[in-house]
Structure formats: C-alpha cells, structure tokens
Image (cartoon, helix red, strand yellow):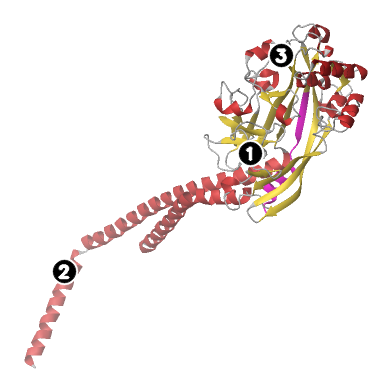
Amino acid sequence: MAIDKAKVAIGFVAAGAMTLMFGLISAFTGPAMMRYQVGKNTMIDPKNDMSYTMWKDLPVPFFMSVYFFHVLNPEELLNGEKPMVEQRGPYVYRKSCQKENITFHPNFTVSYREFRTYHFEPSMSVGNESDLVTVPNMLVLSAAVMMEKLPFALRLLISATFKTFNEGPFLTKTVGELMWGYDSKLVDFLNQYLPGMLPASGKFGLFAEFNNSNTGLFTVNTGKDDIKKVHRVDSWNGLTELSYWRSPQCNMINGTAGQMWPPFMTTESTLPFYSPDACRSLELVYQRPGEMLGIPLYRFVAPKTMFANGSEYEPNQGFCPCRQSGLLNVSTCRHNSPVFISHPHFFNADPVLLDSVLGLNPTEEEHGLFIDIHPLTGVPLNVSIRLQLNLYIKRVSGITETGKISEVVMPLLWFEENGYIDGPILNTFRTNLVVLPAVMEYLQYILIALGLLTVIVASVVHHKVKRSLNAAEISSVTENPGASANGQVKGSHGSQEKSLSAAEK
C-alpha cells in the first residue's frame, strides 16, 4: 500500500513539473503570442471582422456640436469698440461616415474616399436650426481685408458693389442657413464674373462643403508588411506632401487619417494625423492614463505648441505669416480669406486675443481637445476634437462697410466632433481585447502556482511515504532478532553438511 502511495506521489511530482513548465512557457511566449494576435487582428484586412468594420463604417455614434458666437453690439463694433459675443448652442448633428471605392494595392496600401453626412438632432440641441444668429458677414469683411492692397478707386467700386446687393458688415441668418448655405445675389454675381473666387458654386454657408462630401482620396498602409505602419497615410489626393506652407516640415503629410493608430503604444508615443479640414498634419501628446468601463486607456491632448506662432515655436515658422500665438492661418488653403483656426474661446492662446473680445471664458475641461486610446490596439475609445473658426477683420479705407472697426480676430463659431465606443461593439471589444488577454495572463500565473504547489506537496508526501516504509522495515528487524539469528546458524550448518559430503566423495 505504501509502495502505491509512493508511486502516486511520484506521478503527482511529474504532473506538477509539467504544469509548472507549461506555465513558464506560457509566461515567456504569451506576450509574443498576444502581440502576434493583436497585430494580425488590427491590420486592415476584410478577414478581420471587428477591426475592419470599425475602420470601414465607424459603427459608433459620432456627433458634431456647433456653438455660434452671436454678436451683441454690431453698431458699437463698427464704431471701434470691442466686440461683445454670446455663445449660442449647441446645435448637434449626427455624423455618418462611410468609406467607399475601397481598393487594395500590391504594395500593402489601400485607397478609399470617406463620405460624410450630417443630420440635425433636435433632442440633443439647445435650440433649433431656425434660431436667428447675428455674425460678421464673411463675404464683406473678409473681402475687404483681401482687397486692402488694391487701388483706392477699385476699393470704392467694391464697396459700391456691396451696396448694390444690400450686403452689410453683419448679417442675421438662421442657424440652418449659416451652416448649410443661403441664397445671395452677391455670391451668384461673383460666381458668374469671378469664378473660383468663392469655395462654393451655389449657396454660401460655413459648412456647405462638409455635408454630402468626401475628405479626398486617402491611400493608407494596411500594416500587412509592418504593423507599425498600419493606418499611416501614404498619400492624399495623390500627394505625398502639401504645397500650402512655407517649409518642407510644415508641408509633410504625417501620421494616420485621424481615426485609428498603430497598436502597442507607450507613454512616449504621440498621435500624429493629417486633417484635410485644417490643411495640415497635427500631433497630440500623451497626458495621463485612465480607464473606460474597465478598459485601460491613454489620454492624448494638444500640446501648447500646436498653434503657437513661429516666434514662440520655431518649427511653426513655416505656417506663417503669423499673428498672435494660438492661431493657425489657413488663408492659403481657404481662397486667401483671412480665416484662422484656434482652440475654442482662445484656450491656450495669447491673452491679447481673449482680451480683445468680450464674452469668452476658456477652460481646459470644456475647450481642450483630447483622444482616449486603447494603447494595446491603437483604437480610440473616446474622442473630442474641438476647434474654433475665426475671421480677421479691420477697417479698410475705401470700403465704407468696415466703418471704424478695430483690428481684431473675431470668433465666428466653434465645433466639437465627438464619439465613443458603446453598445455591442464595446462588449465585443472588451471581450476580445481585454477580458481574454487578462484570462490568458492570469491562467499562466495559475498554472505556475498550481505546478509549484503540486510539486512541493507531492514531494513532501513521497518523502513521508519513504520514511514510513524505512521505519517499518527497521521496526520489523528490531522486533524479531532471534528468527534472524537462527536463520543464520541454520544456514551455517547446512553449508558444513554440504562440504563434508563433498569430501567423502
């Protein structure tokens, strides 16, 4: 019975050793296997159902919230006083994106056009598209700045043209008209006699180019040859660099298309992406770790240098001519109109800009932009891109519509594009990329612990069984010494008898 116990103990030792070995092998090979699986499942490939669907159709809700700056004192502003504005909104639109004309190429890239549409969401909005808002008339005030260098007589003619079409320095329109376009006889006139001067050929609206449009022909890496290059833009509209800016660095098309990034991020990683709407590449930097419904994340934000002018941040010199820090001059890609992009309410900008307009109150919580990324996969979990559209206005002699306006960068509106993973896609994401890897990680530790415990316990049991067996044998000899001695004497007599017999023969 004791022998059987010893054999069983040896069997458990062997089993424990195998379990321990399997756990150690898993500990060493597990991370490599996980990286392989993540890389395989995050490359752009129709075989990857979840990641390909997320890339192709953006199955999560995405919204654009627009806030207008209603001008409270247009008459006083014409007399040289500071503009006073009141924020109106948000006016919320559901954004739908869908990639079409998807074409895979032999060099591990894929081309597509992403079409976007916007639908007003009254239940999420503060107000309606029929709300009236007073804003600077871009057709008049931007044209005045653009034509400042023309001969005085020509400026007088332009001013007369504005009066002919009843175009003043400010206009009051509905939110819907300002967003998607309104009829203007001046626009019709300019499109007929000066084609190409305006970005729109029909109605004039601040977002008229956005709705039912595409962001251009993107060609991006699929990651099949190198997962570190997945989603990286190879070209845009056939271009590998831009021509808007004054330095090769500023004209570079860097990073991804702004929807997904390569996996395996660290706190040293950045989020570079190319934005056709901003006409340049942007880059976010790591701020802090976090968590969303049990999923670990890294938060990336805009650095203070993003819209810094060239004198404060030398690499941005190529984006000049610059004004105060905190403004991006996009006139070169906006038909030379004096339009500037900034953070909302001039957050992270030169205090002079904030001081020149009454009614602004910047805070990081409400006006800073961020992207929360799952670092293992590079998939955004929560996105909030916030930008402000501004118009540089001033008095221009000969164009009487400009009155005595002081030189000022006037905020027109700011918008936030935000979305987050939710619903079934979140559950699938959590199960495949959070729960299962965690289970695999814990399993290897369990196997190591179980193997060690089994080896130790089985070894102890085997040792005790052996000691018990030896003790039993010694006890048996000690309790019956006579039997052993008689056996030895008898054996001696037998040997002697055999020797005598042999001699006699």
Mark 3 residue type = Leu
Residue 376, quarter of the rendered image:
top right
Whether 8 is among the magenta residues is: no
Residue 72 placement, left or right of 321: right
Residue 383 in the image: above or below residue 106: above
Q: Nearer the viewer, residue 97 or 14?
A: 97
Eyeballing the image, is 381 above or below 81?
below
Span shown in magenta: 47-66
Secondary-structure class at tag 2: helix
Q: Is residue 499 visible?
A: yes
Judging by the rendered image, the residue that carries numbered circle 2 is: 485
Residue at 68%, 21% (x, y): give it.
366
Residue 360 tag number:
3
Q: Residues within 10 Å of mark 3 (few under 14, many from 20)?
A: some
Nearer the camera: disc 3 or disc 1? 1
Residue at position x 87%, y 26% in the image: 176
- The residue under the point 63% across, 53% down is 108
Between discs 2 and 1, the one toward the N terminus: 1
| Real-space Cα separation, disc 3 to disc 1, in angstroms | 33 Å
Secondary structure state at the residue bearing disc 1 = loop
Residue under pointer 1: 253
